[in-house]
Image (tube, coloured by chain):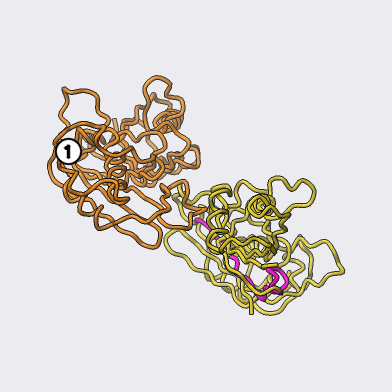
Chain colours: A yellow, B orange
Amino acid sequence: MRNIKLIMEYDGTRYNGWQRLGNTENTIQHKVENVLSRMTGENIEAIASGRTDAGVHAYHQVVNFKTNTTMTVEEIRDYCNQYLPHDIVVKKAEEVEDRFHARYHATSKKYLYRIWNGKIPTAFHRKYTHYILHDLDLDAMRKAAAYLVGEHDFRAFSSVKSKKKSTVRTLYSIDIHKEGSQLDMMFHGNGFLYNMVRIIVGTLIEVGEGKMRPEDIPEIMAGKVRAHAGVTAPAQGLFLYEVYYD
Amino acid sequence: MRNIKLIMEYDGTRYNGWQRLGNTENTIQHKVENVLSRMTGENIEAIASGRTDAGVHAYHQVVNFKTNTTMTVEEIRDYCNQYLPHDIVVKKAEEVEDRFHARYHATSKKYLYRIWNGKIPTAFHRKYTHYILHDLDLDAMRKAAAYLVGEHDFRAFSSVKSKKKSTVRTLYSIDIHKEGSQLDMMFHGNGFLYNMVRIIVGTLIEVGEGKMRPEDIPEIMAGKVRAHAGVTAPAQGLFLYEVYYD
């Protein structure tokens, strides 16, 4: 069987995320598998690099599936783009070696969190940003972020319930960049816990608002209590931005 | 009475345009007048630089209204942004001299028409672009556009029914620029007839597809018959981009 890798882009606004337990109807995985199965006449399972939550977007999601189709990769890409909803796009399709697995082999990922920060809101970016009207102290946010970079137990910054699985992850970098009203926060790490980016962003926003100090971060991290971190920032500002493989 | 000028931005997707005869409920003017009237306790009439059609967007629409309110211009801007729907934004409010009239005093306007042109569609810009998959001959389109620049009778490129009113307008420039898949066509003119930009764009697309030659343009213009020009390009790619005053 052939192993096909897809690079996908999607606007998560309308969906219950990539995957959902229970009612899977309105998931991106369901839409993609439907089109691939129709295309090949096979029962296709699409494996993504990871789940994205309800309302979360992807600039670059990696997916793979096994098939016996004789279609070229360009034909696969074009078929998908013709039959997928307009808010789900296949940017590239390529044939990869049999052992490639989009989830197991991902070595690191980048997530972008985008805030629209200024007195004047935006009509065009409103679905792809979290709007914050008041000024944020970016220096304080960068100081707080520096405490999070490195290998840490991020339990306090996650919605993980299980105490069995490890909540240790490595954040390689957090870059905070503002241009005009657009405040971009880029996270690069070897893995991300459930809601980890959104809880870190929510915490950094509270630091930016002066409700928390950068120096509070190490204590929150050490305490491992979710309630001590900030609120979970809204899904609409979050993008899966890049997935890396060896 | 004070005369207040607003610079507005809106996503036209959900609306029947700035203004509509008959049922005005779902127009941008109606939404804006409602908020301004509630804010001032007066019966406000909002005058725009011109109508935008159903589904057409604005980066920069100019509006003025008369009021006795003692609110500052910042308070007016912030009140509007708090109570307007999220797809309608006041970017700036300022007090102007009594005689300023957003429509009568506009001397020229810029419209942007945005096409997403490439084999790979876009999940994020789909509501703000017209998607064309196949290649377009930009050189031929620029040649055709050159015939349209200047003072001409644009009747063939409009949906104007009346034969009484002049359909002579001056186009100062048409700039066609492509970066990646984003094909921007910027129109600057002293005035635009009903549907004029969208019909010109539809015609230029047919030239780009090789269905029409650039040399056909002068004949279409001279014939003054709407049916000889191209189809009306979709509203979703069109933005009112700038309005100029002396």
Residue A209 can be seen in this image: no
Percent x, y for residue B223? 16, 33
A11 up-or-down from B97: above or below: below
The residue indicated by pointer 1 is B221
Residue at position x 31%, y 34% in the image: B48
Q: Nearer the viewer, residue B27 or A147?
A: B27
Could you say whether the residue bearing mark 1 is in a helix, strand or loop?
helix
Label 1 amino acid? Answer: Met
B177 up-or-down from B165: above or below: below
Residue B157 falls left or right of residue A246: left
Residue at position x 37%, y 33% in the image: B18
Task: Give the quadrant of the C terminus of chain A.
Answer: bottom right
Total residue callouts: 1
Percent x, y for residue A222? 77, 73
Q: Main secondary structure of the magenta part?
A: strand
Q: Residues within 10 Å of mark 1 (few under 14, many from 20)?
A: many
In the image, farthest residue toward the front: A70
Magenta span includes B190: no
Q: Which of the 4 image quarters holds residue A73? A: bottom right
B240 up-or-down from A89: above or below: above
Residue range corresponding to the magenta coloring: A99-116
Magenta span includes A103: yes
Q: Nearer the viewer, residue A226 or A136?
A: A226
Residue A170 falls left or right of residue A91: right
Task: Give the quadrant of the N terminus of chain A.
Answer: bottom right
